[in-house]
Amino acid sequence: MDPDCLFCNIVSGNIPSTEVYRDDRVMAFLDIVPAAPEHILVIPAQHLTFLRTADESHETLIGHMALMADRIASERGIRDSGYRLTVNQGPDAGQQVDHLHMHLLGGQKLGGVA
Ligand code: AMP
Ligand code: ZN
C-alpha cells in the first residue's frame, strides 16, 4: 500500500468507490468519469505501478485481472455483446493513475482503439 496512491486508498476504503468485485488479489469499481455505459476499473489489490515494473512473479496476478474482468463482463451482461479491456501505460496513452489498472468498457458499440 502506497499512502499517496489514489487506487491504494480505494482498495483500503479510505476513498469511497462503487465496488463491483473484490477478492484477495483484485478489486474492481466503477470509473468516476465513464467513457461508456459500462466502464469498470480492474486493479491489483497490491500497489503495482507499471507493467515495466512487473516481473514473472506478477504473471498470475495480471492473468487473474484479465479473467476477473471477463467474469465481471459476464455478470454485468456485456460479455456476449462484447467489451474492450485496455491498459494505459505512460504519457502517450494518457495514463493518469500510477497504479496498474485495466479499463473494462462496454454497453455500446465502441469507437476505434486509438
Ligand atoms: P488512466 O488514464 O488509464 O490512468 O485511467 C485512470 C482512470 O481513473 C480514469 O478513467 C479516471 O476517470 C478514473 N478515476 C480517477 N479517479 C477516480 C476515482 N476516485 N474513482 C473512480 N475512478 C477514478
Ligand atoms: Zn497503489
Image (tube, rainbow, N blue to C red):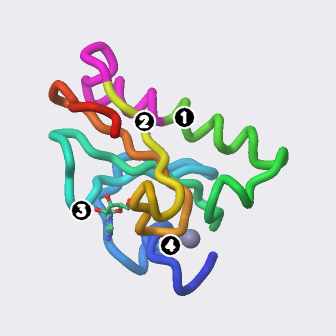
Region in magenta? 69-82
Identified by mark 4, the residue type is Ser
Quadrant occupied by the C terminus: top left
Q: What element carries label 3?
A: loop
Q: Label 2 crowding class (10 Å Cα cut-off): few <14, some 14-19, many 20+?
A: some
The image shows residue 23 at horizontal and vertical percentages of 55, 48
Q: Earlier in the sequence, mark 1 or mark 2?
A: 1
Q: In whole angstroms, how far apart are the C-alphas of marks 3 and 4? A: 17 Å
Cβ of mark 3 under 8 A from ligand 1: yes
The image shows residue 41 at horizontal and vertical percentages of 39, 51
Q: Residue at x 29, y 53 (%)?
A: 30
Q: What element carries label 2?
A: strand
Cβ of mark 1 under 8 A from ligand 1: no
Name the residue that disc number 1 marks: 66
Q: Which quadrant contains ligand 1?
A: bottom left
Identified by mark 3, the residue type is Ile
- Residue 37: quarter of image: top left
Q: In whole angstroms, how far apart are the C-alphas of marks 3 and 2? A: 17 Å
The image shows residue 69 at horizontal and vertical percentages of 45, 35
Q: In whole angstroms, how far apart are the C-alphas of marks 4 and 1? A: 22 Å
Q: Which of marks 4 and 1 is nearer the N terminus?
A: 4
Q: Residue 32 carries which label?
A: 3
| Residue 8 horizontal side relative to residue 96, left or right | right
Q: Which residue is drawn at 28% across and 56% down?
A: 31
Name the residue that disc number 2 marks: 85
